[in-house]
Protein backbone atom coordinates (compact mmCIF):
# COMPACT_ATOMS: atom_id res chain seq x y z
CA UNK A 1 0.00 0.00 0.00
CA UNK A 2 1.26 3.47 -0.81
CA UNK A 3 2.46 5.56 2.10
CA UNK A 4 1.22 8.74 0.45
CA UNK A 5 -2.40 9.11 -0.63
CA UNK A 6 -1.55 11.52 -3.45
CA UNK A 7 0.70 8.96 -5.14
CA UNK A 8 -1.49 5.94 -4.39
CA UNK A 9 -3.55 4.01 -6.93
CA UNK A 10 -6.59 4.82 -4.76
CA UNK A 11 -6.19 8.53 -5.59
CA UNK A 12 -5.74 7.75 -9.28
CA UNK A 13 -9.04 5.85 -9.35
CA UNK A 14 -11.15 8.47 -7.57
CA UNK A 15 -14.51 9.30 -9.12
CA UNK A 16 -15.84 12.78 -9.75
CA UNK A 17 -19.06 13.72 -7.97
CA UNK A 18 -20.93 13.45 -11.28
CA UNK A 19 -19.80 9.83 -11.64
CA UNK A 20 -20.83 8.90 -8.09
CA UNK A 21 -24.27 10.49 -8.16
CA UNK A 22 -25.62 8.53 -11.11
CA UNK A 23 -28.59 6.21 -10.88
CA UNK A 24 -28.03 2.97 -12.77
CA UNK A 25 -30.43 2.51 -15.75
CA UNK A 26 -31.94 -0.65 -14.18
CA UNK A 27 -32.73 1.33 -11.04
CA UNK A 28 -34.24 4.17 -13.09
CA UNK A 29 -36.58 1.64 -14.71
CA UNK A 30 -37.75 0.66 -11.23
CA UNK A 31 -38.51 4.32 -10.44
CA UNK A 32 -35.53 5.11 -8.21
CA UNK A 33 -34.62 8.79 -8.41
CA UNK A 34 -31.27 10.36 -7.59
CA UNK A 35 -32.59 11.52 -4.21
CA UNK A 36 -33.87 8.00 -3.46
CA UNK A 37 -30.48 6.61 -4.47
CA UNK A 38 -28.64 8.94 -2.08
CA UNK A 39 -31.03 8.14 0.77
CA UNK A 40 -30.70 4.39 0.22
CA UNK A 41 -26.89 4.63 0.27
CA UNK A 42 -27.00 6.61 3.54
CA UNK A 43 -29.57 4.26 5.05
CA UNK A 44 -27.39 1.24 4.19
CA UNK A 45 -24.72 2.48 6.60
CA UNK A 46 -26.93 1.74 9.61
CA UNK A 47 -27.01 -2.07 9.20
CA UNK A 48 -23.27 -2.15 8.50
CA UNK A 49 -22.59 -0.20 11.71
CA UNK A 50 -25.00 -2.32 13.79
CA UNK A 51 -23.43 -5.52 12.54
CA UNK A 52 -19.91 -4.15 13.06
CA UNK A 53 -20.73 -3.29 16.69
CA UNK A 54 -22.09 -6.78 17.26
CA UNK A 55 -19.03 -8.56 15.88
CA UNK A 56 -16.71 -5.95 17.42
CA UNK A 57 -14.53 -4.91 14.49
CA UNK A 58 -12.31 -1.85 14.28
CA UNK A 59 -13.52 1.44 12.81
CA UNK A 60 -11.11 0.99 9.92
CA UNK A 61 -12.97 -2.18 8.86
CA UNK A 62 -16.29 -0.33 8.89
CA UNK A 63 -14.84 2.51 6.80
CA UNK A 64 -13.46 0.01 4.30
CA UNK A 65 -16.81 -1.81 4.09
CA UNK A 66 -18.62 1.45 3.40
CA UNK A 67 -16.07 2.31 0.70
CA UNK A 68 -16.58 -1.07 -0.95
CA UNK A 69 -20.35 -0.64 -0.87
CA UNK A 70 -20.14 2.82 -2.42
CA UNK A 71 -17.70 1.64 -5.09
CA UNK A 72 -20.00 -1.26 -5.93
CA UNK A 73 -23.07 0.91 -6.42
CA UNK A 74 -21.22 3.29 -8.71
CA UNK A 75 -20.76 0.31 -11.03
CA UNK A 76 -23.79 -1.91 -10.43
CA UNK A 77 -27.52 -1.61 -9.89
CA UNK A 78 -29.23 -1.86 -6.52
CA UNK A 79 -31.84 -4.09 -8.11
CA UNK A 80 -29.07 -6.39 -9.33
CA UNK A 81 -27.27 -6.57 -5.96
CA UNK A 82 -29.55 -6.71 -2.90
CA UNK A 83 -28.43 -3.99 -0.44
CA UNK A 84 -29.49 -6.13 2.56
CA UNK A 85 -26.91 -8.72 1.54
CA UNK A 86 -24.28 -6.35 0.13
CA UNK A 87 -23.77 -4.55 3.46
CA UNK A 88 -22.82 -7.62 5.52
CA UNK A 89 -20.80 -9.04 2.65
CA UNK A 90 -18.83 -5.81 2.31
CA UNK A 91 -18.16 -5.95 6.05
CA UNK A 92 -16.98 -9.55 5.68
CA UNK A 93 -14.73 -8.65 2.75
CA UNK A 94 -13.37 -5.56 4.54
CA UNK A 95 -12.55 -7.60 7.63
CA UNK A 96 -10.42 -9.85 5.46
CA UNK A 97 -8.75 -6.96 3.63
CA UNK A 98 -7.96 -5.18 6.90
CA UNK A 99 -6.62 -8.38 8.48
CA UNK A 100 -9.29 -8.44 11.15
CA UNK A 101 -11.18 -11.44 9.83
CA UNK A 102 -14.70 -12.18 10.99
CA UNK A 103 -16.15 -15.57 10.18
CA UNK A 104 -19.13 -15.63 7.82
CA UNK A 105 -21.08 -17.83 10.22
CA UNK A 106 -20.66 -15.21 12.95
CA UNK A 107 -22.08 -12.55 10.63
CA UNK A 108 -25.03 -14.79 9.75
CA UNK A 109 -25.65 -15.43 13.46
CA UNK A 110 -25.76 -11.71 14.27
CA UNK A 111 -27.83 -10.84 11.20
CA UNK A 112 -30.47 -13.31 12.39
CA UNK A 113 -30.19 -11.98 15.93
CA UNK A 114 -30.57 -8.31 14.89
CA UNK A 115 -33.23 -8.82 12.22
CA UNK A 116 -36.04 -11.25 12.86
CA UNK A 117 -37.85 -10.76 9.52
CA UNK A 118 -37.65 -13.09 6.53
CA UNK A 119 -35.99 -10.44 4.35
CA UNK A 120 -32.71 -10.96 6.22
CA UNK A 121 -32.65 -14.76 6.21
CA UNK A 122 -29.21 -15.31 4.74
CA UNK A 123 -26.96 -18.30 5.03
CA UNK A 124 -23.18 -18.57 4.87
CA UNK A 125 -23.30 -19.61 1.23
CA UNK A 126 -25.22 -16.43 0.35
CA UNK A 127 -22.47 -14.25 1.82
CA UNK A 128 -19.74 -16.26 0.12
CA UNK A 129 -21.48 -16.10 -3.25
CA UNK A 130 -22.07 -12.37 -2.92
CA UNK A 131 -18.42 -11.94 -1.92
CA UNK A 132 -17.34 -13.29 -5.30
CA UNK A 133 -19.83 -11.05 -7.13
CA UNK A 134 -18.59 -7.99 -5.25
CA UNK A 135 -14.96 -8.87 -5.92
CA UNK A 136 -15.76 -9.20 -9.60
CA UNK A 137 -17.68 -5.91 -9.67
CA UNK A 138 -14.78 -4.13 -7.94
CA UNK A 139 -12.34 -5.70 -10.41
CA UNK A 140 -10.59 -7.27 -7.40
CA UNK A 141 -9.34 -3.81 -6.41
CA UNK A 142 -9.55 -3.72 -2.62
CA UNK A 143 -7.02 -1.03 -1.72
CA UNK A 144 -8.52 1.72 0.40
CA UNK A 145 -6.43 4.55 1.78
CA UNK A 146 -7.66 5.72 5.19
CA UNK A 147 -6.30 8.50 7.40
CA UNK A 148 -6.19 6.17 10.41
CA UNK A 149 -2.55 5.22 9.93
CA UNK A 150 -1.27 8.76 9.31
CA UNK A 151 -3.44 10.54 11.89
CA UNK A 152 -1.09 9.93 14.86
CA UNK A 153 1.77 11.42 12.84
CA UNK A 154 -0.34 14.49 11.98
CA UNK A 155 -1.20 14.94 15.66
CA UNK A 156 2.44 14.62 16.64
CA UNK A 157 3.47 17.16 14.00
CA UNK A 158 0.79 19.54 15.30
CA UNK A 159 2.23 19.31 18.81
CA UNK A 160 -0.59 17.21 20.24
CA UNK A 161 1.64 14.49 21.67
CA UNK A 162 -0.39 14.12 24.86
CA UNK A 163 -3.57 13.02 23.03
CA UNK A 164 -3.82 9.28 22.49
CA UNK A 165 -5.79 7.70 19.65
CA UNK A 166 -8.24 6.25 22.19
CA UNK A 167 -9.23 9.76 23.29
CA UNK A 168 -10.31 10.72 19.78
CA UNK A 169 -13.93 10.18 18.85
CA UNK A 170 -14.81 9.29 15.31
Image (cartoon, helix red, strand yellow):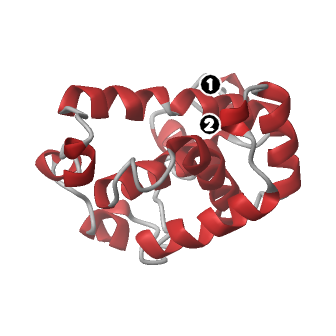
Residue 84: name its quadrant. Answer: top right
The foreground one among 84 and 103 is 84
Is residue 18 visible in this depiction of the protein? yes
The residue located at (16%, 53%) in the rendering is 19
State which mark lies toward you, 1 or 2: 2
Residue for badge 2: 48
The residue located at (76%, 43%) in the rendering is 57
Residue 168: mark in rendering: 1
Relative height, residue 90 to residue 139 (above, below): above
Left or right: where 167 falls relative to 158: right
Instruction: State the image coordinates of residue 132 (x, y, percent, origin top left).
Output: 59, 73
User: First in sequence: mark 1 or mark 2?
Assistant: 2
Relative height, residue 82 to residue 12 (above, below): above
Instruction: State the image coordinates of residue 143 (x, y, percent, origin top left).
Output: 49, 68
Left or right: where 72 falls relative to 163: left
The residue located at (61%, 48%) in the rendering is 85
Residue 27: name its quadrant. Answer: top left
Left or right: where 144 falls relative to 91: left
Amino acid sequence: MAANFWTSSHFKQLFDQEEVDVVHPLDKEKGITLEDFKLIKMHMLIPICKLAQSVKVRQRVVATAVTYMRRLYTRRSMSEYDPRLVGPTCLYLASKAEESTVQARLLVYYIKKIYSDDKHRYEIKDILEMEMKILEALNYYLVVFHPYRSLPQFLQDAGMNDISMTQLTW
